[in-house]
Image: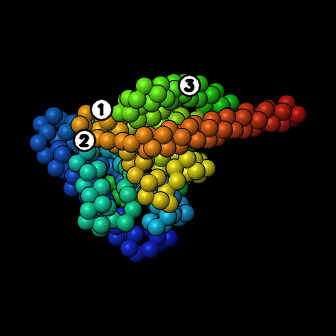
Amino acid sequence: MQAGLDHLPQSKQRELADVVRILFEEFEIAHARGNADWNRKGRIFKIVLYGSYGRGDWVDDPVGGYQSDYDILVVVNYERLTEFEHWSAAEDRLMREVTISHTLTAPVSFIVHSLKDVNAQLERGRPFFIDIVEQGIALYEADGFEFAQPRNLPREDARVEAQKHFEEWFPSAQTFLQNAKDNTDRERPKEAVFLMHQATERLYHCTLLVMSLYSPKSHRLNFLRSQCEQIAPALAEAWPRDDKFSRRCFELLRLAYVNSRYSPHYKISPEELNWIGERVAVLEGLVEKICRDHIAALDGAHISDRNATDGN
């Protein structure tokens, strides 16, 4: 991993120190009541900054509505500690630090994996985890728990796997989007927007799986959007951020996963629903092009490599 945070302003370095502190505090609170052996002996091995803040190409444009997240990998010692229930309080607290107390100037998106799983991903040549190891910056590391040596995944293997992910996830997203259109025509707005959320979620998972052979287990559209736009910046075109109406519509879509199904207070106008449907359709087209181009590039590179080998 890379060393140091000297490429970041002092204010950002202080914020990341606060993020580490909060993660540890909430981890300790979450496990103070546990009696199981894996709970009592639970440990954080590493906290790694990756993504745009790790690379140094972050964007901070609150006026224009675009801000890079602090992307964090938390590495723990037991697989059971990666489940969301152990980290929901930390996620809520970090969100409050951004939206209420304003002590953090950027949202925090963190994923949690066991060291065993990360090392297995590295040994399988998963690009997402290899990039973290090569470009990430350790905000905390316990001694004696090293990452495995990454394996170079053959391009043909990557292409086959990427194609498989595309053939599974992209048609699934299209089905949900068609069902959303059907419910819009039937004037069932809550069902329609929920299905649009599901289509969007699947399009983002499709992108991540095709491009990096990994996608986090998450329903949070703002998190998935951030992760996707880092590896495929063209996807930002799907969601305009420069006006209040556009931002409100994305927020309605984000909230639809729970609120459109269970909250009697969730409301969405025909104008908002139609706009969301149009933007999901734009996202669909962008995802299809990006994924097909990536698979074709892997195929082309594989053919070139094979021809070079044959020529020798």
Whether residue 36 is visible here, answered yes or no, is yes
Mark 3–mark 2 CB contact (< 8 Å): no
- Residue 72, compared with residue 123, is above or below; it is below
- Mark toward the start of the polypeptide (3 vs 2): 3
- Residue at the extreme right of the image, as rendered: 311
Whether residue 164 is visible here, answered yes or no, is no
Residue 181 location, x and y as percent?
49, 29
Tag of residue 261 = 1
- Please report the residue visible at 24 percent of the width from the left and 37 percent of the height from the top: 263
- Mark toward the start of the polypeptide (1 vs 3): 3
Side (left or right) of 156 relative to 79: right
- Please report the residue visible at 18 percent of the width from the left and 35 percent of the height from the top: 37
- Residue 32, compared with residue 242, is above or below; it is above
Tag of residue 292 = none
Residue that carries the numbered disc 2 in the rendered image: 265
The local secondary structure at tag 3 comes to helix
Q: Kindly identify the amino acid type of the residue bearing the numbered disc 1.
A: Arg
Q: How far apart are marks 1 and 3 (CA)?
A: 24 Å
Q: Distance between the residues labelled 3 and 2?
A: 32 Å
Q: How far apart are marks 2 and 1 (CA)?
A: 10 Å
Q: Which of 186 and 212 is in front in this view?
A: 186
Residue that carries the numbered disc 3 in the rendered image: 171
